Amino acid sequence: MLRVELRIPFCDLSAALASRGAATEAALLRVVRSGRYVLGPEVASFEEEWAGFNEAAYAIGVGSGTAALSLILRGAGIGQGDEVIVPAYTAPATWMAVALTGARPVGADVDSRTGLVDPRAVGAAISPRTAALVGVHLFGRLAPMASLRALADRDGLLLVEDASHAHGAREGELRVGAIGDATAFSFYPTKLLGALGDAGAVTTDDEQLARAVRQLRCYGQGSPPSDAVAIGPNSRLDELQAAVLRSRLAELEPALNRLRALGRRYRDALASAPELGLPQPAADGREPAWHQFVVTHRARDGLRAEMARRGVGSAVHYQPLPPRLSAFAGSGGFSAAENLSRLVLSLPFDPWLTDAQADVVCEVTGSANSSRACT
């Protein structure tokens, strides 16, 4: 098979490190020299800073975004026999986090344009066993939280934000991380605020839930160890990752603004590309807190192959969909989500992409779109 050398890969984390390597190395060295490696001052400081940034009362550092969502549900007493409604179009981690609690993830279809969960589908999926709703902020667009809040309040349900794609975003006066009853964040290296490995956090204004999550993340005993009132995993944010995240937190707003500018640049350059569906700004004309720039095309696989041949990488988010996975019995019936899964293509998109590289991405995407491979 011919090996294609990509001029612009889908994701180049070395570019991110090159721009902030000295700060990252200083943060790591500070921890190494401290002799405190687990649940020390770096974690405590990051939790305080992340809570403040998100305008939430509490933040708890955990091992991953998946753990964050799972521990929120467990901390709220959700588990065996319960159902949690989640979007059909999302990363598998959302569904896995629910299943890990012993609860059953119940899919709801999504808006055919944005991929965000459809409140009507959520309402139709609510049953006597429903204990929580999860609104996923997808690719930087915010889930319809006002509608989900109304449904949750009507039936006394926990409302959780999965904000792994929306660091720093706002809905009106509220910052993501303080809109739902609790919020799960991932700091996987490709996220806007990324660690050097797996890391996550929970934010909430609920003191009792914060205490439960803090205890569950450490064998159910908390720190310092005490009696374990529940069986908990080892899912602690470690000192090294916390120090790296602290060193990068000041860059979050500038990075967010850079992605918004790139989103406008992509949309302007690709506006005339035939049959290429582009993500649109919010109803008020503002750019979302983009995490990915995801286009649609009826010949997506041909477009992707032609782009790769011309030296530009891409990715597909998501295929297969979580409800199509064998672990969830391969269930279907989500027409909008399934259609999006066949059409979507994520272009290279991160704050360290230069204007020149962005122009190459747009040029190659546009010309590949016009080629016979994509007709």
Image (spheres, rainbow, N blue to C red):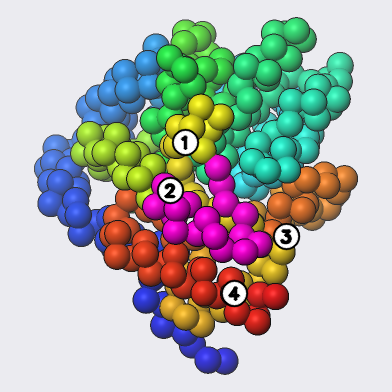
Residue in the foreground of this view, choosing between 329 and 29: 329
Q: For the residues labelled 1 and 2, say whether their Cβ atoms are less than 8 Å apart.
A: yes
Residue in the foreground of this view, choosing between 342 and 188: 342
Rounded to the nearest angstrom, the CA distance separating label 3 from label 4 is: 19 Å
Residue 161 visible to an observer of this rendering: yes
Q: Residue 188 at x, y = what percent? A: 43, 47
Rounded to the nearest angstrom, the CA distance separating label 3 from label 1 is: 24 Å
Q: Which mark is residue 342?
A: 3
Task: Name the amino acid type tagged 1.
Answer: Pro
Q: Residue 334 at x, y = what percent? A: 82, 44
SS type, badge 3: helix
Rounded to the nearest angstrom, the CA distance separating label 3 from label 2 is: 22 Å
Q: Residue 110 at x, y = what percent? A: 73, 38
Which of disc 1 and disc 3 is earlier in sequence? 1
Which of disc 2 and disc 1 is earlier in sequence? 2
Magenta includes 1?
no
Q: Residue at x 53, y 33 (%)?
A: 282
Where 219 sits versus 240, above or below?
Answer: above
Which of disc 4 and disc 1 is earlier in sequence? 1
Which residue in the structure is indicated by mark 2? 263
Q: Residue 265 at x, y = what percent? A: 39, 52
Q: For the residues labelled 3 and 1, say whether their Cβ atoms are less than 8 Å apart.
A: no
SS type, badge 2: helix
Task: Name the amino acid type tagged 4.
Answer: Ser
- Which residues, given as a range, are shown in magenta? 263-280
